[in-house]
């Protein structure tokens, strides 16, 4: 089976992104396919697992990397591309908005976030994506601006246990800032500058290297797994820069070489090591098997970087 056909032989959540990002399908066709996410496949399954109070697995976040919580369920729905205006999606988000709170953080409403910047970056992106803006997102943005470190990034261990930024936390925050900017349009200059400084933190390090030595900062940054949860990897980072809409930055050439080095002879990318935690749904294949999610993301990154990335037919 050729790569394009193989990618399309999949869940609606992946098909609509293949149609949009790789095949340049007409907008109306993409929209029709995307509308199926809420009514069949992984998206519909996940929506059906929410209880009447708005919770998944009775947790707002999930202890010990339990991925069946409100936070991780909404994060997955966003990555699957569930249409926020679909009545089923809207009702699910409305239940969260009305009932779910952070029980360990003064019962703050869910979309107001908590205290860790990596989590708050995720909540910010979810609120913006699903159209829940206002006091909650303002609270998160104020915290994130105040917590940005001198080197331009963020770290959940700062300031007590670290004075420097974390790749993982910084990318979580950047994704939230970008999604917020897409939703509201023009943002204050200080907020735009915060995102630029965060991007520079990653760009100066070629997306995965130590600034001091030029060596790979963490071996796990070369592991591509979907969903990525809060973990940083080179493919996730390059997909962020692609989504941000700027031209490819030459400082990311080493990161692009990592992507190309993992391309199989069958024009596909294998699944990496799955991140730990209990899940409701296995949306990708086991380690080492050809991964449609990794292949989609890698091909659209290469296309953005103007490398020959057309899925072979």
Image (spheres, rainbow, N blue to C red):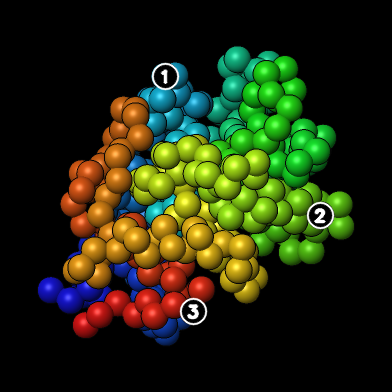
Q: Earlier in the sequence, mark 3 or mark 2?
A: 2
Q: Residue at x 25, y 70 (%)?
A: 267
**Left or right: 19 as drawn, with respect to 221:** left
Q: Residue at x 59, y 24 (%)?
A: 101
Comparing marks 3 and 2, which lies closer to the viewer?
3
The correct choice, above or below, for 112 with respect to 41 in the image is above
Place of residue 110 in the rendered image (x, y in percent of width and height, measured from the top left): 60, 31
The correct choice, above or below, for 19 with respect to 218 in the image is below
Comparing marks 1 and 2, which lies closer to the viewer?
2
Q: Which residue is mark 3?
A: 306
Check the image and name the residue furthest to the front: 213
Place of residue 108 in the rendered image (x, y in percent of width and height, measured from the top left): 67, 24
Circle 1 — which element? helix
Circle 3 — which element? loop
Q: CA distance from mark 1 to mark 2?
A: 35 Å
Q: CA distance from mark 1 to mark 3?
A: 41 Å
Q: Which residue is mark 1?
A: 64
Residue 240, by quadrant, is: bottom right
Which quadrant holds the N terminus?
bottom left
**In the drawing, what numbered circle is on residue 193?**
2
**Quick one: 193 or 48, which is closer to the camera?**
193
**In the drawing, what numbered circle is on residue 308?**
none
Question: Is residue 68 in view?
Answer: no
């Amino acid at each position: 089976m050729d790569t394009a056909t193989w990618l399309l032989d999949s869940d609606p959540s992946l098909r609509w992104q293949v149609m949009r990002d790789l095949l340049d399908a007409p907008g109306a066709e993409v929209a029709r396919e995307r509308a199926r996410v809420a009514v069949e496949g992984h998206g519909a399954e996940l929506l059906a697992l929410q209880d009447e109070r708005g919770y998944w697995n009775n947790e707002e976040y999930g202890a010990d990397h339990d991925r069946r919580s409100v936070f991780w369920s909404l994060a997955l729905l966003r990555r699957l591309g569930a249409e926020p205006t679909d009545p089923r999606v809207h009702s699910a988000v409305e239940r969260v908005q009305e009932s779910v709170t952070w029980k360990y953080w003064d019962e703050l409403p869910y979309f107001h976030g908590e205290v860790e910047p990596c989590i708050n970056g995720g909540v910010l992106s979810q609120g913006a994506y699903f159209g829940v803006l206002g006091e909650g997102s303002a609270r998160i943005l104020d915290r994130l601006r105040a917590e940005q470190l001198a080197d331009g990034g963020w770290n959940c261990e700062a300031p007590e246990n670290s004075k420097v930024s974390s790749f993982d936390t910084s990318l979580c925050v950047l994704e939230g800032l970008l999604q917020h900017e897409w939703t509201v349009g023009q943002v204050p200059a200080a907020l735009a500058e915060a995102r630029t400084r965060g991007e520079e933190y990653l760009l100066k390090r070629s997306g995965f290297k130590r600034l001091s030595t030029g060596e790979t900062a963490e071996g796990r940054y070369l592991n591509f797994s979907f969903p990525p949860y809060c973990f940083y990897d080179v493919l996730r980072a390059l997909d962020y820069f692609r989504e941000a809409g700027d031209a490819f930055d030459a400082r990311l050439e080493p990161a692009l070489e990592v992507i190309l080095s993992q391309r199989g002879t069958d024009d596909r990318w294998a699944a990496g090591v799955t991140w730990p935690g209990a899940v409701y749904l296995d949306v990708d294949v086991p380690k080492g098997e050809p991964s449609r999610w990794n292949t989609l993301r890698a091909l659209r990154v290469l296309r953005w970087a103007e490398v020959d990335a057309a899925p072979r037919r």
